[in-house]
Amino acid sequence: MHYQVIVDTGILLALIDRNDGHHTWVTERLKEIAPPLLTCEAVISESWFLLQRVKRGREILLQLLAQKQIIIQFDLDAELATVMTLLSRYQSVPVSLADAELVRMSELYPSSLIFTLDSDFLVYRKNRDRPIPLLMPLLDA
């Protein structure tokens, strides 16, 4: 089965920052994935902030977007009610706006998996009770 791959912040940071402990794992996995990677604006915003001290990090992030290696495929206006429900449901985890948007994206793209370093995605569920298919180091044994 061909999966659409939804990418989380930690993956983008590890891809761009060669000093990140997960850089090699992420780059090896990306050799197996056909672009584009899907994401949301909240992930791009988190990444932008966290890349402020990485040399050329922000420039590389923008290049990935310009080259359509990563595309923003989420409309928060259209999905706000559902995202608010997810934020409420998982407030004890706690859940970030970016995570809630990615959970919603996993519902909108049924043949998708989330590429993440965040173990909170083991707790989150799509369509209320279904585990989200994940690509993460913890599961990649």
Image (cartoon, rainbow, N blue to C red):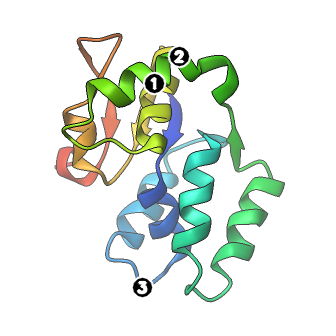
Mark in front: 3 vs 1: 1
Are discs 2 and 1 less than 8 Å apart at CB?
yes
For the point 45% across and 24% down, the residue is 84
Residue depicted at 53% across the width and 59% down the height: 46
Q: How far across and down, in percent of the image, does residue 6 sit?
A: 51, 37
The answer to whether residue 56 is above or below residue 109 is: below
* Crowd tier of the residue under label 3, counting other residues whose Cα lies within 10 Å: few below 14, some 14–19, many 20 or above: few
Mark 2 lies on a secondary structure that is helix
* Residue beneath disc 1: 84
Determine which residue is flagged by label 2.
81
CA gap, disc 2 and disc 3: 38 Å
Image position, residue 133 (x, y; %): 32, 27
Q: Which residue is mark 3?
A: 19
Q: Is residue 100 above or below residue 129?
A: below
Mark 2 surroundings within 10 Å by alpha-carbon count, few (fewer than 14), some (14 through 19), many (20 or more): few
Q: Mark 3 falls on what kind of element? A: loop
- Spatial CA span between label 3 and label 1: 35 Å
For image coordinates 52% across by 25% down, the residue present is 105
The image quadrant that residue 11 belongs to is: bottom left
Is residue 94 toward the left or the right of residue 135 in the image?
left
- Residue 38 appears at what percent x and percent y? 61, 38
